[in-house]
Every structure is written in structure tokens, then in C-alpha cells.
């Protein structure tokens, strides 16, 4: 099979974006040899209209029949938040979740709401992010798995906190992303909800407008949890696309 077709098969079938670095690493792992950055870019070019390339955020995806994935212009459901929140995480991961930022940070972001088995009420965060970080004097890389549960204003309640908390069975850091515009009547629930979230170690990110990066505010940082490595492995194997899994394995063992 031509190398460009191998790359195309690795890209998520649903048309979700993956990072250029993850695609490059996954392709090298699948081919069993390290390919150069120039060769990877050449393969993207050979795929032509079969793929879409976002040079600003360094993301690549399959171009499905409807063309390049478009983010919704109106926000009416939790699903409408997902793409905007994912874009925010891609851009702000190092600054928001790591202080100070590590020497190097490799990440994959996965929509886990609609990938894998549909069973289990508490096992499907909307988005997940896996990070491999390296520091000058740490002998091994650090692995962190983040989960993100997204809610509309009506979800500003204790149930949302416990739903996010349930994801710590397989994630180190659990976050609740709340689309809560200023003046929403649900704001009255926020203080008690934040108190509960802090008690359980759940992080909270308030979103004034999912389409506006400046409106995302970290209200509460998540506390690190200690899920078993077996549960983390099982979650990633079930919920993450192949390209993201291959990239993570390569980065961890590099």
C-alpha cells in the first residue's frame, strides 16, 4: 500500500483533527521506520483533497464528503461546544495546565464522547487529552491524562461535578467545562458547585462564549488523582483513535 494511503487510514474516520506531530509519529510507528518531516509533508500533499490541513494550529484530518469540518456558529447543545473547546485546549494546554511549562510537551486531544463502546453512563468524558512532558532532570517522561465534561448552563449543578469526578477512575485530572454566560440564572448555583468541586478535586473552566478564547476562565484547578495504570491503558485503548494511540506509545518509550 502506498505510504500516503497508510497515512490516510490512520486519520480518524469521523474527520476529527489530529496534530501533525501525532500523525507523523503514528505513521513512523506503523511503517516501522522513522520518516522525515519533509516526507510527511509530501505525503499530505500527495493526498490532495482527501485531507484538510490547518497550518496555524498544525492539525490534519480526513476531508469527508461535507468538506473541512466546520465549527458551529450557534451554540444550542453540549455537542456544539466540543469543537470550540477542543480548539481552545490545543492552543492553551501548556499555559493553562502546566506552570511553568515543561521543557517539551507532546499532546493528543480525543473526542471521547462518540468513540468506542456506548455502554456505561460514567465512562464517556466529552473530550480527553493525553500529555507526555519532559524536564531537564527527570529521568523518565511524565504522562498525564485529562478528562473534560462539557455542560450547558442548565448543567451548573452538583450532578455535573459528580459526573466529572467519575472520570477519575481512568484520568489523572478531571475538568468540568461550563458554558455559563454572564447573567445566566444558573449563576446562583456556582458558589456551592465550586465548593463541591474543590472538595472532590474536580477542576472547573467557565466559558462565557465557546467561540471566544478570551472568555475561557480557569475557576478551579483539578487535583491529581491516581487511577490504576491498567484502567488508563484500557480507557485509551477503547476510546482513542489508532493514530493517537500509536503516537502516545512512541512518545512514552522514546
Image (tube, rainbow, N blue to C red):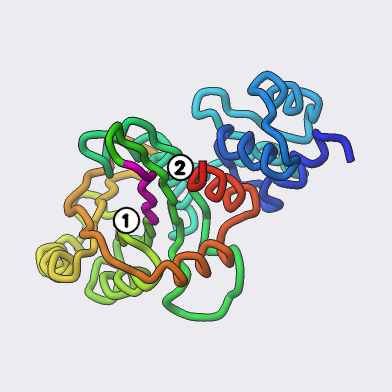
Q: Earlier in the sequence, mark 2 or mark 1?
A: 2
Secondary structure under tag 1 reads strand
Between 40 and 220, the residue placed more toward the observer is 40
Alpha-carbon neighbours of circle 2 within 10 Å: few (<14), some, or many (≥20)?
Answer: many
Q: Which residue lies at the image location 23% right of the left edge and 63% below the top edge? A: 202
Residue 156 shown left or right of residue 167 in the figure = left
Where does residue 111 sit, x and y in percent of width and height? 52, 55
Between 205 and 169, the residue placed more toward the observer is 169
Q: Indicate whether 25 appears above or below 229.
A: above
Alpha-carbon neighbours of circle 1 within 10 Å: few (<14), some, or many (≥20)?
Answer: many
Q: Quadrant of the N terminus?
A: top right
Q: Which residue lies at the image location 44% right of the left edge and 56% below the top edge? A: 128
The label shown at residue 177 is 1
Residue 29 shown left or right of residue 46 in the figure = left
Numbered disc total: 2
The reply to whether residue 188 is visible in this rendering is no
Q: Which residue is mark 2?
A: 107
Depth check, mark 2 against mark 1: the one in front is: 2
Residue 179: image quadrant is bottom left
Q: Indicate whether 219 appears above or below 166.
A: above
Residue segment shown in magenta: 139-145
Does residue 149 show up magenta in the picture? no
Q: Which residue lies at the image location 19% right of the left edge and 65% below the top edge? A: 201
Question: Which residue extends farthest front?
Answer: 139
Q: Indicate whether 82 appears above or below 202.
A: above
Where does residue 224 sit, x and y in percent of width and height? 25, 60
Between 10 and 175, the residue placed more toward the observer is 10
Q: Which residue lies at the image location 73% right of the left edge and 28% below the top edge? A: 44
The reply to whether residue 230 is visible in this rendering is yes
Where does residue 194 sit, x and y in percent of width and height? 14, 63
Q: Are marks 2 and 1 in contact (CB under 8 Å)?
A: no
Q: Indicate whether 77 appears above or below 70.
A: below
Amino acid at each position: 500500500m502506498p505510504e500516503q494511503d497508510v497515512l490516510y487510514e490512520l486519520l480518524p474516520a469521523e474527520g476529527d483533527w489530529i496534530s501533525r506531530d501525532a500523525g507523523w509519529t503514528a505513521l513512523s510507528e506503523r511503517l516501522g521506520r522513522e520518516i522525515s518531516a519533509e516526507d510527511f509533508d509530501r505525503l499530505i500533499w500527495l493526498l490532495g483533497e482527501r485531507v484538510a490541513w490547518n497550518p496555524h494550529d498544525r492539525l490534519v484530518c480526513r476531508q469527508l464528503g461535507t468538506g473541512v469540518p466546520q465549527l458551529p456558529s450557534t451554540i444550542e447543545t453540549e455537542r456544539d461546544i466540543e469543537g470550540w473547546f477542543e480548539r481552545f485546549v490545543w492552543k492553551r494546554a501548556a499555559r493553562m495546565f502546566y506552570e511553568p511549562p515543561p521543557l517539551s510537551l507532546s499532546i493528543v486531544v480525543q473526542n471521547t464522547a462518540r468513540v468506542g463502546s456506548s455502554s456505561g453512563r460514567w465512562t464517556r468524558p466529552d473530550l480527553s487529552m493525553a500529555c507526555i512532558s519532559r524536564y531537564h532532570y527527570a529521568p523518565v517522561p511524565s504522562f498525564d491524562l485529562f478528562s473534560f465534561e462539557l455542560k450547558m448552563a442548565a448543567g451548573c449543578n452538583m450532578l455535573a461535578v459528580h459526573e466529572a469526578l467519575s472520570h477519575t477512575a481512568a484520568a489523572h485530572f478531571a475538568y468540568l467545562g461550563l458554558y455559563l454566560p454572564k447573567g445566566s440564572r444558573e449563576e446562583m448555583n456556582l458558589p456551592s458547585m465550586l465548593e463541591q468541586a474543590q472538595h472532590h478535586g474536580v477542576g472547573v473552566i467557565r466559558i462565557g462564549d465557546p467561540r471566544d478564547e478570551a472568555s475561557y476562565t480557569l475557576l478551579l484547578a483539578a487535583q491529581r488523582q491516581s487511577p490504576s495504570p491498567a484502567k488508563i491503558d484500557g480507557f485509551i485503548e477503547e476510546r482513542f483513535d489508532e493514530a493517537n494511540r500509536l503516537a502516545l506509545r512512541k512518545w512514552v518509550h522514546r
